[in-house]
């Protein structure tokens, strides 16, 4: 390591890890000398700190459209509608330096169809640290908001969390998992932050992203998809317009959903309702093959078919759609290897 890099690392260790506190006894002259040297070094390398510590800057937050497009095409199976919406919505939003409101996506479908996975792909292609970024915030209903008696407290806490994090970084992402298990009315507390306000108390929320994940609406999506199959139509002919209206109404009127009669829907603040279709046998096989690749295993179509065949499908007579999507593929595969 050259002397400049050694010098940089030494300064970072002293400044960022609190190493200077270990120096208990030090003369004033030495202290002044160190301060002068540090000031001079930081003046020469003003951005050096940002390369070692995650900050709300382009070094750490930069949208990769090519990467997102490739990931959706190669890793998300059976979701042509969701892939198209996500790519266009995120690309348009991230390329707009002055959006009029935050991006709000509501992802719906049965378990194991790819909702959480897509959230991860979005984060991976915006933040250098992906889901581990300090600017990606995940709320799980049963963990963060468990008690119906404390909804008013949760509303206040949620507003404080969002306000504080967006103040820290305008390009923050908030993911709300298990929306179907959230207490009705709670999510309405974030309405001011996703509305068309330029600023609230001096803070702009327009560059933030809000993603809702929910099983609510899954029945409506499945019904439409099954009808397509029964009429002999190709699955890929299914378009957003075929499911969006029934999906939004189903979610809005579902009393067991956190989006029940929410002002976010009533005031048209959700930009896209993204349907995740139930997965067929062939999609489950593709998931198994992808999991093999992720584990560094050689491709084995026979094993992929064996794993896929052990899953439960519906309707019982036709066995078209996987009940759990690809959710249990990893554990099933581990059993065979």
Image: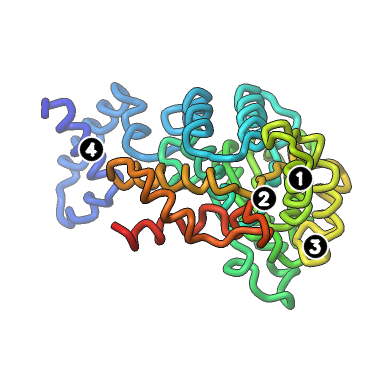
For residue 207, above or below residue 277: above
**Mark 1 falls on what kind of element?**
helix
Marks 4 and 2, the one that precedes in the sequence: 4
Marks 3 and 1, the one that precedes in the sequence: 3
Q: CA distance from mark 1 to mark 2?
A: 31 Å
Q: Are marks 1 and 2 in contact (CB under 8 Å)?
A: no
Residue furthest to the front in view is 317
Q: Residues within 10 Å of mark 2 (few under 14, many from 20)?
A: many
Marks 3 and 2, the one that precedes in the sequence: 3
Please tell me whether mark 3 or mark 4 is closer to you in this view: 3
**Residue identified by numbered label 2:** 212
Please tell me whether mark 3 or mark 2 is closer to you in this view: 2
Q: Quadrant of the N terminus?
A: top left
Q: CA distance from mark 4 to mark 1?
A: 68 Å
**Mark 4 falls on what kind of element?**
helix
Q: Which label was assigned to residue 185? A: 3
Q: Percent position (x, y) of residue 121?
A: 50, 39
Residue at coordinates 59% horizontally, 47% vertically from top-left?
280
**Residue identified by numbered label 1:** 230
**Residue identified by numbered label 4:** 11
Q: How many marks?
A: 4
Q: CA distance from mark 3 to mark 1?
A: 38 Å
Q: Percent position (x, y) of residue 268?
A: 84, 41
Q: Quadrant of the C terminus?
A: bottom left
Report whether 254 appears left or right of 118.
right
């Amino acid at each position: 390591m050259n002397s400049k890099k050694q010098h940089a690392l030494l300064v970072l260790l002293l400044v960022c890890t609190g190493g200077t506190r270990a120096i208990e006894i030090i003369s004033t002259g030495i202290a002044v000398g160190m301060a002068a040297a540090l000031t001079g070094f930081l003046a020469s390398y003003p951005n050096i700190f940002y390369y070692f510590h995650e900050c709300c800057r382009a070094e750490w937050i930069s949208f990769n459209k090519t990467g997102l497009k490739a990931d959706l095409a190669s890793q998300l199976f059976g979701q042509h509608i969701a892939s198209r919406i996500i790519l266009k919505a995120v690309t348009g939003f991230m390329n707009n330096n002055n959006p009029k409101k935050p991006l709000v996506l509501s992802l719906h479908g049965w378990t194991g169809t790819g909702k959480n996975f897509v959230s991860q792909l979005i984060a991976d292609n915006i933040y250098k640290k992906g889901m581990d970024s300090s600017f990606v915030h995940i709320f799980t209903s049963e963990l963060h908001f468990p008690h119906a008696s404390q909804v008013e407290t949760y509303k206040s806490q949620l507003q404080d969390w969002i306000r504080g994090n967006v103040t820290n970084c305008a390009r923050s992402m908030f993911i709300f998992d298990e929306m179907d298990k959230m207490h009705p009315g709670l999510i309405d507390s974030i309405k001011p932050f996703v509305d068309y306000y330029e600023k609230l108390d001096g803070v702009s929320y327009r560059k933030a992203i809000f993603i809702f994940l929910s099983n609510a609406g899954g029945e409506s999506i499945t019904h439409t998809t099954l009808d397509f199959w029964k009429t002999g139509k190709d699955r890929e002919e299914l378009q957003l317009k075929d499911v969006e209206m029934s999906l939004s109404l189903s979610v809005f009127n579902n009393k067991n959903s956190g989006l029940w009669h929410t002002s976010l829907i009533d005031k048209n603040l959700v930009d896209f309702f993204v349907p995740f279709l139930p997965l067929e046998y062939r999609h489950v096989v593709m998931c198994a093959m992808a999991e093999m690749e992720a584990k560094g295993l050689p491709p084995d179509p026979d094993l992929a078919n064996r794993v896929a065949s052990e899953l439960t499908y519906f309707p019982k007579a036709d066995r078209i759609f996987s009940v759990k999507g690809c959710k249990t593929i990893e554990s099933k595969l581990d059993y065979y290897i």
